[in-house]
Amino acid sequence: KDTGRAMFNGRDMRNVVDMMESDAKFEFYGNTQFSAVRLPFKGNGASMIFILPDEGVTVDQLLESLSAEDFDQMRASWKRDQMIVRLPKFDIAQKADLNEAYRSLGVPGAVKYTFISTPDAGGVTTWQCARITVDEHGAKAAAVTVSDLCTAPMPSILTFDRPFLYFFCDDSTGTILL
């Protein structure tokens, strides 16, 4: 609704950023490690979940401790109330090589297999690029995976002014999409 300049407290530095603010009824959840808010997309059964670690808990610590049961508990415990949510505008793009991820899952064939036997065929290279933009108009996300084959009670004001997590979620199944 409203956007203004505000401080964002990063890991190693503080920056002034464009901070969006909305005063509305939101679904939220809180426990002893984090507070979360669910922002649904219009009409398609999906939502974006923003998770803010509590003061003194880093994103890395939270990621290490989160489990599937934590997500199930959050999904079953959303409360709806009037609150102010402050969230920075952001635009993030990332490229990831998926070969190591495949190997860590015990799927070496997925990265070693080749359809065509050529002298320089060293296996399959698979990578993924993703981009997420969140602004006053909503969220836009795109991802492409290419292979060379051919995640305590919540305060009434929730300000995401330090590192946070976000997920896209299918509302009917609770499946994390991205």
Image (spheres, rainbow, N blue to C red):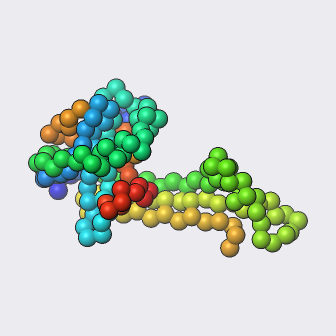
- Residue under the image location 77 percent in, 71 percent down: 115
From the viewer's perspective, is 22 left or right of 32? left
Residue 4 in the image: above or below residue 173: above
- Residue at the limit of the structure toward the right, as seen here: 119
- Residue at the limit of the structure toward the left, as seen here: 82
From the viewer's perspective, is 107 left or right of 38? right
Residue 133 in the image: above or below residue 155: below
Residue 69 in the image: above or below residue 118: above
From the viewer's perspective, is 46 left or right of 153? right
- Residue under the image location 30 percent in, 49 percent down: 75
Task: Mark yes or no: residue 18 visible.
Answer: no
- Residue under the image location 70 percent in, 70 percent down: 149
Rendering coords of residue 62 (x, y %): 41, 35
Which quarter of the rendered picture does the N terminus lie within? bottom left
Rendering coords of residue 15 (x, y %): 34, 38
Which quarter of the rendered picture does the C terminus lie within? bottom left
